[in-house]
């Protein structure tokens, strides 16, 4: 009986202990879960923050596309040019072709203009002459016509503006030059340069040398008037006939004035400044062709001094 009583006593005690343990574990579990939950939540919040940061950063990284390489401007096609180095008519086209970036391929036509091959293409036997497949006869001469054609073909508005009024002034200046100023310059300088005189004029005739000399002096005296027209009318306070930049009329005028050095013509101060400004503005495009004309003039004057 004693043993049975003991066993009976142990069973209730064990059950009581099990219940107590269950309660203890049940109370402890919420605490453990509560402590673990904040850490899990904190980790989730960190993950969300990281995702947002990545999402914000991603657009910035892709917002700036790689810089595109700048396309190089297309190189202007070259021009085939037959020319005579001592000539200011030729100098005008040589200067223009260089200034316009046309990369001229020049052929010295000295002594060749009367050859059958040259005359077959150019019956006028004149230079400068350009060759271009786009021309009806394949060639073109006359310096002003050449510059107009090339400016039109390649859209060189800064040398030959498209606006009708501005273009008309450039045309007027060039036509006035070739029709009025240049004949005076030719009559004044050709005898000294050794160039042939125009038929029908005193310089080409059998007149007495004194008469020829008088005609030459008269031509020199006549230069002042049209020269002043270029200054007061065509430039009209502007650096150039073309405004702030030289036009094809400016190139033709400056080249023409180069010849006057052979007779020591006293250019007005504005004309000296104008020619210096042309050379400064166009650089080598002007100075290289001008150097050929100046070199020839220096040679002619040295020969005259030696005699």
Image (cartoon, helix red, strand yellow):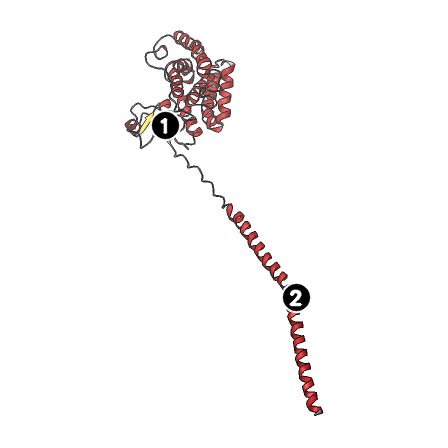
Q: Which residue is drawn at 66% across and 78% down?
A: 18
The image position of residue 241, as x and y in percent, is: 45, 19
Instruction: Characterize the local packing of mark 1: few (<14), some (14-19) or many (20 or more) Cα atoms within 10 angstroms.
Output: some
The image position of residue 160, as x and y in percent, is: 40, 24
**Quadrant of the frame with the N terminus:** bottom right
Given this view, does label 2 or label 1 mark the residue nearer the observer? 2
Image: 60 above or below 250: below
Q: Residue at x 48, y 26 (%)?
A: 282
Tell me the element at label 2: helix
Q: Give me the C-alpha separation between circle 2 and circle 1.
A: 93 Å
Tell me the element at label 1: helix
Q: Which residue is drawn at 71% across and 91% down?
A: 2
The image position of residue 126, as x and y in percent, is: 34, 23
The image position of residue 53, as x and y in percent, is: 57, 52
For mark 1, what is the residue?
Answer: 152
For mark 2, what is the residue?
Answer: 31
Q: Is residue 45 left or right of residue 158?
A: right
Instruction: Characterize the local packing of mark 2: few (<14), some (14-19) or many (20 or more) Cα atoms within 10 angstroms.
Output: few
Q: Quadrant of residue 103?
A: top left
Pick whichever, 251 or 238, lies toward us. Answer: 238
Q: Earlier in the sequence, mark 2 or mark 1?
A: 2
Q: Is residue 242 left or right of residue 132?
A: right
Pick whichever, 275 or 110, lies toward us. Answer: 275
Looking at this rendering, what residue extends furthest in the bottom direction? 1
Q: In which quarter of the image is residue 35?
A: bottom right
Q: In this view, does 197 lie to the left or right of 243?
A: left
Pick whichever, 126 or 275, lies toward us. Answer: 275
Pick whichever, 287 or 145, lies toward us. Answer: 145
């Amino acid at each position: 009986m004693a043993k049975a009583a003991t066993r009976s006593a142990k069973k209730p005690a064990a059950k009581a202990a099990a219940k107590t343990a269950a309660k203890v574990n049940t109370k402890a579990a919420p605490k453990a879960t509560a402590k673990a939950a904040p850490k899990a939540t904190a980790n989730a919040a960190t993950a969300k923050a990281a995702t947002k940061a990545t999402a914000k950063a991603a657009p910035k990284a892709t917002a700036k596309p790689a810089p595109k390489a700048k396309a190089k401007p297309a190189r202007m096609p070259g021009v085939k040019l037959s020319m005579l180095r001592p000539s200011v008519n030729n100098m005008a086209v040589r200067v223009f072709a260089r200034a316009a970036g046309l990369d001229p391929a020049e052929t010295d036509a000295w002594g060749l203009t009367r050859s059958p091959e040259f005359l077959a293409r150019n019956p006028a036997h004149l230079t400068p002459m350009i060759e271009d497949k786009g021309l009806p006869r394949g060639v073109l001469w006359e310096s002003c016509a050449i510059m107009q054609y090339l400016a039109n073909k390649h859209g060189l508005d800064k040398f030959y503006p498209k606006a009708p009024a501005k273009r008309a002034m450039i045309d007027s200046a060039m036509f006035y030059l070739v029709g009025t100023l240049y004949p005076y310059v030719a009559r004044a300088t050709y005898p000294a340069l050794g160039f042939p005189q125009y038929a029908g004029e005193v310089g080409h005739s059998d007149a007495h040398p004194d008469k020829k000399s008088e005609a030459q002096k008269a031509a020199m005296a006549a230069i002042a008037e049209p020269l002043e027209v270029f200054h007061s009318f065509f430039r009209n306070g502007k650096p150039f006939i073309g405004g702030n930049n030289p036009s094809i009329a400016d190139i033709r005028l400056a080249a023409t004035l180069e010849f006057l050095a052979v007779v020591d013509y006293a250019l007005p101060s504005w004309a000296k400044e104008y020619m210096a400004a042309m050379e400064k503005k166009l650089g080598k495009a002007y100075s290289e062709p001008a150097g050929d004309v100046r070199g020839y003039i220096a040679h002619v004057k040295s020969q005259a001094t030696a005699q």
